[in-house]
Amino acid sequence: DIQMTQSPSSLSASVGDKVTITCRASENINKYLNWYQQKAGSAPKLLIYTASSLQSGVPSRFSGSGSGTDFTLTINGLQPEDLASYFCQQSYSSPITFGQGTRLDIQ
Amino acid sequence: QVQLVQSGGEVKQPGASVRVSCKASGYSFYSNAISWLRQAPGQGLEWLGLINPYNDKTNYAQNFQGRVTMTADTSTRTVFMELRSLLPDDTAVYYCARDNSDLGADEGFAPWGQGTLVIVSS
């Protein structure tokens, strides 16, 4: 199975900050990396697919980059509603696997 | 709009089985596979497998082979997931989620159902 490692596991930032979360795959997954946001008590919501494509309806302050084994989710201009956990997920091979998550707190 | 609505929470004894349903609306039921995932309390996400309603083809994660069955009822646009021989470690929120693309799971999962809490306890 492909292992996905996210960092950091948690972070705290202020409104307006630029936030970066990284995800590393245990082997080459090409561009097949997706990012999700999960707010407390809710189901995950797709933000970014195939590394850098913005899902319809997602604010443009969210962006993704990377290929191969190293990927990044960036939030430009953090908003209070971005308080959530963020997960990466590889869709390159079965079984589909997820990172352990990054908890984002707003200072 | 595209929507997945799941059945309500369940409490089961160890060794029992649970069946969770996921009713789809707002799109062609045959066009996208549906996966089942779970999230134990305070933990990450685990993929159990998928079913393609077009041809009933399934792909189960090896960890759940022999213990999980996924089926689809096209007449009611509903997908079902049955998990057998439950253990306390199976306590989790179970989600169904649709392939974001009709070409497969490459583009992630969207949308997700609201989740079904399954508690396994004696």
Image (cartoon, helix red, strand yellow):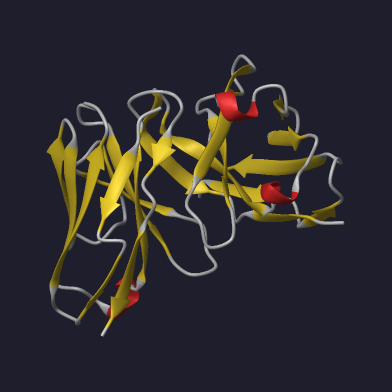
Query: Residue B32: x percent and y percent?
Result: 50, 28
Q: Picture quarter containing residue B70?
A: top right
Q: Judge from the rendering whether residue A2 lies leftward or rightward of residue B65; answer left or right.
A: left
Query: Residue B7: x percent and y percent?
Result: 74, 51
Query: Residue A29: x percent and y percent?
Result: 25, 27
Considering the image in quadrants, where does the C terminus of chain A appear? bottom left
Considering the image in quadrants, where does the N terminus of chain A appear? top left
Does residue B8 sit above or below B31 in this rendering?
Answer: below
The residue under the point 28% across, 80% down is A106
Q: Judge from the rendering whether residue A74 lies leftward or rightward of residue B17; answer left or right.
A: left
Q: Picture quarter containing residue B79?
A: top right
Camera-nearest residue between A36 and B87: B87
The residue under the point 42% across, 26% down is B102
Camera-nearest residue between A58 and A66: A66
Extreme-bottom residue of the structure? A107
Query: Is residue B33 in view from this perspective?
Result: yes
Q: Judge from the rendering whether residue A52 lies leftward or rightward of residue A85; answer left or right.
A: left
The residue under the point 25% across, 60% down is A8
Query: Is residue B26 in view from this perspective?
Result: no
